[in-house]
């Protein structure tokens, strides 16, 4: 539907995916962009616009379970509390740990932190934000004295030079990317810093395809250049910064000249100089950064190297001039506010903030606060592995897939005496290890607040009844706290009660710092329930306007006063820290991992929408054609990446000169629920940044080989729930794809099979249609019930000899298979419809071959293609790829 029309009776809420934090007008059957929300002004990306299609019962966890058996809530709560009590009694509070998520709401997060630190008395509360934002957090604190993003989204539009470092904004923060694109005007320049050419590079005037892990060299070199060309701001440095001399001296050692930078970063000297000149000449510069910068053993240094240049030029917190950390998850920022990270207390108070522990203990009314910080995520799971943690409660995250060295994490989970998992979904790689499973309410059912990348607090509002016995996370936590005997401190009846307490605590923390602390939403402690319900998006710190209205703050530190003790920002000397996982002759390839456009993390929600699995259907290995030639593989070859760890990664080769030779890129999304062996974190060692504890997730190492297979097959079944069962053992590779009318598996294997006699077990019924051509290695069989297709198995030597997937899925929608369909199913690939090619536009299911043919027919602009094929006209997430096809027509 037209995105400008707001459906009747819709509720204004916030998208639960990325940190852009788009406003959504939602009903149970449709979602549109909220035109009034400042983050997106009506836009939604492809994931956001498919949200209503994720509101399905499929796969939901409906009731609590203990050791796999469904139980009542009272029984489950008793089991949780019993395990916590026993662990605390026998091994002390430090034997209990919570592992939380940037996808929880602020209210959930606040209660979890209060229960753990305040009342169980364990410091071991960490979150998946450790894998995501912790380097940026640490760097903000080092430079500015507090974890604050100084700028706002508008700055990305006002900037005359936009530097995107380690951020594939086009795919990971699509609506923000569209804002950047829309604000294009004469003279505005964009520099993308990424070892791969991504969809984001479509916007770039200059793409620095640097050697991975050399960002600190590039930014140290920039500082040197600025200083040597009189482009620093000496007045600002003198008044507002400390550490300039040492920082510059260090930079001079690391990156003395453009030539040295170019050599170390594997760039051309003129490219480096171009970037430096533009930076020097452009007062309105914004440097936006994300995981290519954070997920590094030098992640904190990477961020500080960026901040150093902004401080040296006085470009912090000014319109169009600021560093800007893009947060990943919808509420990574809210989690940081409440103290979800193990090294912080609450409300931006640190363990070493003078008087903070006492203040917090007084506020919460407890004497159990731990004395010192707890384990960071990777250390935490190591402690679980050692047996030091007896009860681990995981909430809103899937660590079996997302933590580095997944095999070891799974060992730890298997060995932990009590694993409690709160999730909306029944089957994930992590819920498989749960002793106690608690059904959590999902998006649409939950109510609370989130804070996006620009510090904007928005309401997530419920518009659906709870599914079965699912409960909101804050409520589950509150019930546990009460049952543990802390009813007095956990009297919450509704999220607003929690939010007011959180707001009050922020004011207390701010006051105690003599106003130095920036994070302060104290005025929101006065909100009535009705005002909380109607709360409009507002950026913290929040103050009360003259008319008694709530006023937010778009920019921080604009006057050069920072949150440090002396009010000065700290420049930090950065000596180059190169990646810890270093290629060897045995593991000669660098493994870069990251996101694809249409999937969210471990796919528990986005894979519910079949059209989101069409852009990329299978795990892939993106590789430079020269490397492919060296390894003797072609586009589409099933390959295996093997690293030092026990598990390999299987995926189909995608040949692309977007990659640098010697480096491959793999997606992080496929879990054990969707593929036999395609968990990216198996190739990532548990190496972390010594300051932030963030893993080096962008730099694994591996060797590559093609996966020997005698046969490749596609199996499709009408029923959706079931798995392959014992048949999986016959395959060397499988990958599952839920479709609209069926479920499909890619299969491959090297074993000799007797398809004729086994067909019945694959199909789950007797085959009625069979075609076998042993000489060609071809076999087809279908199970048909009352003329309707129920299952089909298609075997061939090569995957690309099999019929088109969309066509096959359509066969399942027919009440009766037509004669043509029967013939095509048996014959092979002949399909009467136009081949769409690789899917580009998910919303309208338009592929690259269709687009290429339309361009040949004269529809050679974005607008013309939109008119004839509709591609790119809904959410716009595919526009960078369409532009690429227009620029380089096939
Ligand atoms: N579609 C989609 N969007 C998402 C998510 C999702 O799962 N799916 N997840 C959300 C979350 S939680 C996050 S944290 C964000 C992440 O958003 P991004 O950080 O933008 O996404 P990534 O793909 O993880 O990595 C970004 C880029 O870093 C580059 N990179 C790798 N090594 C280096 C290096 O050494 N230097 C530099 N400069 N770059 C390097 C990679 O090539 C990659 O293109 O996305 C959010 N948005
Ligand atoms: N190699 C490599 N590893 C990475 C990364 C990378 O780039 N490379 N990126 C890292 C980053 S930045 C991130 S953020 C992580 C993400 O990794 P995870 O957090 O592990 O990924 P998700 O699949 O989002 O897991 C969220 C889980 O919470 C459930 N859930 C959803 N909503 C709710 C709710 O309201 N309540 C509860 N209780 N559960 C809910 C979902 O069903 C799902 O099981 O991965 C990290 N790991
Ligand atoms: S950009 Fe997309 S995923 Fe991110 S908040 Fe907006 S609609 Fe959701
Ligand atoms: Mo993230």
Image (tube, grey):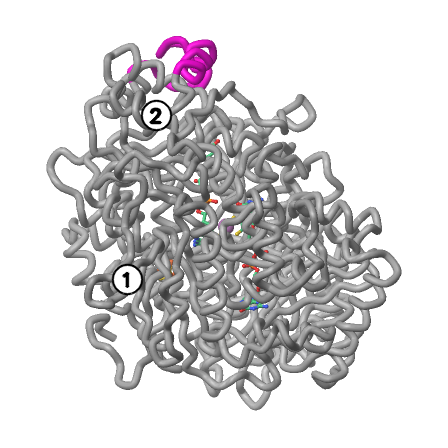
Mark number, residue 309 = 2
* Distance from mark 2 CB to nearest ligand 1 atom below 8 Å: no
Say whether mark 1 is within 8 Å of ligand 3. no
Where does the N terminus fall, quadrant-wise?
Answer: bottom left
Q: Residue at x 38, y 50 (%)?
A: 171
Picture disc at residue 5? none
Q: Is residue 244 left or right of residue 476?
A: left
* Vertical position of residue 548 compared to residue 129: above or below: below
In the rendered image, is residue 708 in sight?
Answer: no
Q: Is residue 98 visible?
A: yes
Q: Given the current orientation, which residue lies at the most extreme left position?
A: 186
Secondary element under disc 1, as helix, strand or loop, is strand
The picture places residue 427, in percent across and down from the top left corner, at 66, 69
> Residue 544 has which mark?
1
The x, y position of residue 257, in whole percent, is: 37, 9
- Give the magenta part as a residue range: 245-270
Helix, strand or loop for disc 2? helix
Is residue 800 shown above or below 758? above
Furthest-right residue in view? 90
In the image, residue 446 above or below residue 230:
below
Q: Please say whether residue 262 is one of the residues in the magenta stretch.
A: yes
- Specify which label sits upstream in the sequence, 1 or 2: 2
Find the distance from the CA under tag 1 to the CA under tag 2.
34 Å
């Amino acid at each position: 539907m037209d995105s400008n029309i707001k459906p009747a009776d819709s509720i204004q809420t916030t998208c639960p995916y990325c940190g852009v934090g788009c406003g959504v007008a939602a009903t149970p059957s449709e979602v549109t962009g909220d035109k009034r929300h400042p983050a997106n002004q009506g836009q939604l990306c492809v994931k956001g616009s498919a949200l209503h299609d994720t509101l399905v019962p499929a796969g939901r966890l409906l009731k609590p379970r203990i050791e796999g058996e469904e139980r009542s809530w009272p029984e489950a709560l008793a089991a949780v509390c019993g395990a916590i009590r026993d662990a605390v009694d026998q091994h002390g509070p430090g034997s209990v740990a919570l592992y939380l998520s940037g996808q929880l709401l602020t209210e959930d997060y606040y209660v979890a932190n209060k229960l753990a630190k305040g009342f169980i008395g364990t410091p071991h509360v960490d979150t998946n934000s450790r894998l995501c934002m912790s380097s940026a957090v640490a760097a903000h604190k080092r430079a500015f004295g507090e974890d604050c993003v100084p700028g706002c989204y508008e700055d990305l539009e006002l900037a005359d030079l936009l530097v995107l470092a380690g951020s594939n904004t086009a795919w990971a923060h699509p609506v923000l990317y569209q804002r950047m694109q829309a604000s294009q005007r004469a003279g505005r320049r964009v520099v993308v810093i990424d070892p791969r050419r991504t969809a984001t590079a479509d916007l770039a005037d200059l793409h620095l395809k640097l050697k991975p892990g050399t960002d600190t060299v590039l930014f140290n070199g920039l500082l040197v250049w600025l200083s040597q060309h009189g482009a620093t701001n000496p007045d600002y440095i003198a008044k507002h910064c400390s550490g300039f001399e040492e920082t510059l001296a260090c930079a001079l050692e690391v990156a003395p000249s453009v030539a040295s930078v170019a050599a170390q970063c594997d760039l051309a000297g003129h490219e480096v100089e171009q970037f430096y000149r533009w930076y020097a000449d452009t007062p309105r510069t914004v440097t936006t950064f994300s995981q290519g910068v954070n997920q590094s053993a030098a992640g904190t240094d990477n961020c500080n190297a960026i901040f150093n240049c902004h401080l040296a030029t006085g470009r912090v917190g000014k319109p169009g001039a600021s560093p800007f950390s893009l947060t990943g998850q919808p509420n990574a920022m809210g989690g940081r506010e409440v103290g979800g990270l193990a090294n912080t207390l609450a409300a931006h108070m640190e363990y070493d903030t003078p008087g903070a522990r006492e203040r917090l203990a007084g506020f919460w009314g407890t004497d159990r606060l731990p004395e010192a910080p707890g384990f960071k995520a990777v250390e935490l799971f190591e402690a679980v592995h050692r047996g030091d943690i007896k009860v681990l409660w995981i909430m809103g995250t899937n660590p079996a897939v997302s933590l580095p060295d997944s095999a070891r994490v799974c060992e730890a989970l298997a060995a932990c005496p009590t694993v409690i998992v709160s999730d909306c979904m029944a089957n994930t790689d992590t819920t498989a290890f749960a002793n106690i499973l608690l059904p959590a309410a999902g998006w649409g059912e939950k109510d609370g607040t989130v804070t996006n990348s620009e510090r904007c607090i928005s309401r997530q509002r419920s518009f659906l009844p709870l599914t079965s016995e699912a409960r909101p996370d804050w409520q589950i936590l509150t019930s546990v706290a009460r049952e543990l005997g802390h009813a007095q401190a956990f009297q919450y009846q509704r999220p607003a009660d929690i939010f007011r307490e959180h707001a009050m605590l922020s004011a207390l923390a701010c006051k105690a710092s003599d106003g130095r602390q920036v994070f302060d939403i104290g005025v929101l402690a006065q909100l009535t329930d009705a005002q909380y319900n109607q709360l409009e998006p507002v950026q913290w710190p929040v103050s009360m306007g003259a008319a008694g209205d709530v006023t937010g703050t778009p920019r921080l530190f604009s006057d050069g006063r920072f949150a440090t003790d002396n009010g000065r920002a700290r420049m930090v000397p950065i000596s180059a820290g190169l990646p810890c996982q270093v290629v060897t002759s045995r593991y000669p390839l660098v493994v870069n991992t990251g996101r694809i456009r249409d999937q969210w993390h471990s796919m528990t929600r986005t894979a519910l929408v079949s059209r989101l699995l069409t852009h990329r259907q299978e795990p892939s290995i993106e590789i430079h054609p020269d490397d492919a030639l060296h390894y003797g593989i072609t586009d589409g070859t099933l390959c295996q990446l093997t690293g030092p760890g026990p598990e390999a990664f299987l995926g189909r080769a995608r040949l692309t000169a977007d990659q640098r030779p010697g480096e491959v890129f793999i997606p992080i999304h496929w879990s054990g629920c969707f593929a036999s062996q395609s968990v990216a974190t198996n190739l990532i060692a548990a190496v972390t940044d010594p300051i932030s504890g963030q893993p080096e997730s962008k730099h694994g190492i591996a060797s590559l080989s093609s996966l020997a297979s005698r046969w490749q097959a596609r199996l499709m079944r009408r029923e959706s729930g079931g798995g392959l069962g014992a048949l999986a053992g016959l395959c060397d590779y499988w990958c599952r794809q839920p479709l609209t009318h069926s479920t499909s598996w890619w299969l491959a294997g090297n074993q000799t099979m007797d398809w004729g006699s086994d067909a019945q077990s694959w199909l789950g019924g007797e085959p009625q249609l069979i075609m076998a051509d042993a000489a060609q290695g071809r076999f087809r069989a279908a199970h048909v019930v009352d003329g309707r297709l129920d299952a089909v198995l298609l075997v061939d030597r090569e995957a690309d000899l099999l019929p088109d997937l969309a066509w096959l899925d359509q066969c399942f929608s027919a009440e009766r298979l037509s004669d043509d369909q029967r013939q095509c199913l048996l014959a092979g690939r002949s399909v009467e419809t136009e081949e769409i090619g690789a899917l580009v536009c998910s919303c309208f299911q338009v592929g690259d071959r269709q687009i290429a043919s339309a361009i040949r027919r004269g529809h050679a602009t974005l607008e013309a293609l939109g008119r004839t094929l509709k591609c790119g006209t809904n959410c716009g997430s595919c526009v960078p790829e369409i532009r690429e096809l227009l620029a380089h027509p096939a």
